[in-house]
Amino acid sequence: MSTLLALVLAAGAGSGVATRLPPPPVRMWQVAWQKQLVAAPPLEWQAQELGGPAVDPVSGYVIVGTRDGRLHAFDPDGVLVWTFQADARFDAAPRIDRDTVYVGSNDGRLYALEIGSGKMRWKYEAQEEVGTTPTVTGDLVLVMTLQDTLLAVDAKTGAWKWHHRREQREGFTLRGAAPVLVVDDLAIGAYSDGTVAVLDVASGTVRWERKIAPAGDFMDVDSLRTASGRLYAAAYSGAVYALDVRSGQQQWELKTPTATRLALGPGVLVAVTTTQILGISPGDGKARWTIPLEGDATADPVIVGSRAAVPNGKALVWVDTASGRVLRRFNPGTGVSASPAVNGRRVYVISNAGALIALDLI
C-alpha cells in the first residue's frame, strides 16, 4: 500500500467518514445470443425500436418487428426461421395465439401469419395505424388503432365484426395507445380524450363509458391492467385510478402528474410517469415507494418474479418491487425503449439500434 493511500484511509477512519466502496452490481443475467436486425441508415439520429418481442411458450420462437417494417422469427438458439415484410414500421409487439401470429403495422393493416413459416393467412385493412398489441379472445381479434378506433375482426378470416370509436377528442394527444383488455364477456378500451369504455365483447355494445382523466392538454389513457374485478388505468393528465370493471365505480385515485405506464405484479402496481417510478398498493392506492426515473416512460414495465423491468429509452431498469431499490440497468449501448418478452428464465430485449438480445436470468 502506498504511503499516500495509507494516510487517506487513516484520516477517514479517524474522522468517522465512511471509506467502504459501494457493493458490486447484482449479477442477474448472462447474454445467450445477440442478432443485429436493422442496418442503420446514413444520418439516422436517435433511433427507437418500439415494437418489442413476443415469445411462444410452446415452440420457443421469439418474434419481433422492427422500424424497417420487417417481422423476424427466431428459434430459442437464435437461428432465423423466417422474415415477413410490411409496408411500414412496427410499433407494438405481436400476439401469438396457438399457431398464428397477429401483428399490427403503421401501414394501416392487421396481419395474421402462420407461426411456423411466416406465411400470411389474412390481412385486415384498418386504414389507421395499428400501433398496439392485438388481443385474442374466442374467435375474435381485438386491437386499438392510434386514431382511437377499437376494432374486432374474425380471428380465422380477418372479416370485420364491429368497431367502437371516440370522435370528440379535444386538445393535444400523445402518440400511442393501450392494448385492449378482455375480462370475461367484456372488452376494455382506453382513449386519448381520457375516456375508458367497457363493451360487450361479442357485439361491441357499450356497457359503460367514463371520462376518468383530469382536465389538461394531454388526457390520454395509455395503459390499463385488470385483476380481481378491478380495472387500473393511468391518465397522463395527472392520476392513476382503480375502477370496478362491471360498474365503472371508482375505487381509489392516486394523483401523480404524467402517469403513463403500468404493470401489475403480486401485491404491487408499478406505475411509471415522466419523472418517477412508483410502487402502489393495489388495494388502497397508496404509494409504497417512489424512485426517480432517468429517461422517458417509453413502454409498459414487465414483472419478472419479484422484479420489474422498466424500459426508459436509455436502458432496461430492473427494480425490486418490494423495496423500490434499483438492482441493475441493462444498456446494450443504444438504450432500450420497448417492453421485453419473458419465457421462463429467458428474457428477450430489442435495443434501439435494432439488435435482438437473449438474456438468461441467473
Image: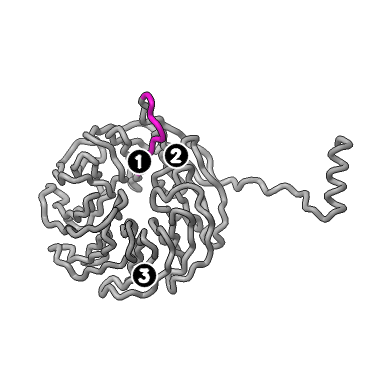
Measure the alpha-carbon separation of dots 3 and 1.
Answer: 33 Å
> In the rendered view, does 106 fall on the left or right side of 337?
left
Name the mark on residue 358.
2
Residue that appears at 46% across and 36% down:
334
Q: Are marks 2 and 3 in contact (CB under 8 Å)?
A: no
Residue under pointer 3: 242
Residue that appears at 39% across and 35% down:
47
Q: Are marks 1 and 2 in contact (CB under 8 Å)?
A: yes
* Residue 44 drawn in magenta: yes
What's the residue type where badge 2 is placed?
Ala
Magenta-highlighted residues: 42-53
* Residue 77 drawn in magenta: no
Q: Is residue 233 above or below residue 128?
A: below
x%, y% of residue 103? 25, 44
> In the rendered view, does 51 fall on the left or right side of 20?
left
> In the rendered view, does 201 fall on the left or right side of 341?
left
